Image: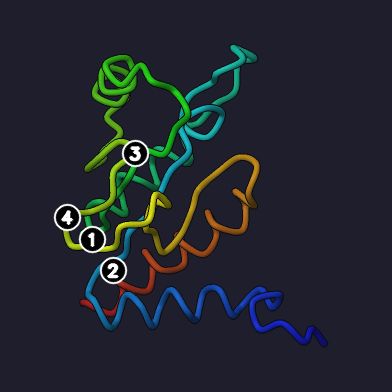
Amino acid sequence: MNKHTYLSLDAGYQRLLREYKTHGSLTVAVDFDNTIYDYHKTGMDCTEVIDLLQKLKSIGVYIIIWTGSEDHSFIQSYCQGAQIPYDTINENPPFYTGKSRKIYYNELLDDRAGLKESFDRLTKIYHYVTTQSH
């Protein structure tokens, strides 16, 4: 048994679910390179993550593209062409009033930060929301 609450796989999902139920939405930060864009041109297929973002947007999730790239016009163009919904690039949501440079999010989709676990939690949230509203 883990002592730290969030080392339990279900704890992260339960926290997201509580946050969704409390606020009626979530904020998701999405790394750009190698999460929704094949930065290294290896033939990586990002379709599953893009599909999830489209589903999350349909339930009111606020999406932030989180990137080290300064070429925001390329990112905007790529997202538009790939039908990737987003609300901001590297900016906090308007409802977040903190002054920290850290982007506010409930969940991070990032190829280097447990993409599979985050993907699974958000997929589960989407299914919960879409089946509970019927």
- Sequence-wise first label, 2 or 4: 4
Q: Residue 90: which numbered mark, if any? A: 3
Does 113 sit left or right of 23 as displayed? right
Q: For the residue marked with disc 2, what is the amino acid? A: Thr
Q: How far across and down, in percent of the image, does residue 46 sit?
A: 50, 31
Task: Provide the residue designation for mark 1.
Answer: 59
Q: How far across and down, in percent of the image, does residue 41 sit?
A: 59, 12
Task: Provide the residue designation for mark 4.
Answer: 94
Q: CA distance from mark 1 to mark 3?
A: 22 Å
Which image quadrant for residue 105?
bottom left
Q: CA distance from mark 1 to mark 2?
A: 8 Å
Q: Write the residue at 32% across / 45% down.
A: 64
Between residue 75 and residue 38, name the one nearer to us. Answer: 75
Label 2 CA crowd tier, 10 Å (few <14, some 14–19, many 20+): few
- Sequence-wise first label, 1 or 2: 1
Q: CA distance from mark 4 to mark 3?
A: 12 Å
Q: How far across and down, in percent of the image, does residue 123 sit?
A: 45, 60
Eye-nearest disc, 2 or 3: 3
What element does badge 4 sit on?
loop
Q: CA distance from mark 4 to mark 1?
A: 18 Å
Q: For the residue marked with disc 3, what is the amino acid? A: Asn
Task: Provide the residue designation for mark 2.
Answer: 130
Q: How far across and down, in percent of the image, does residue 8 sit?
A: 69, 78
Do callouts 1 and 2 mark residues in contact (Cβ within 8 Å)?
A: yes
Which image quadrant for residue 16?
bottom left
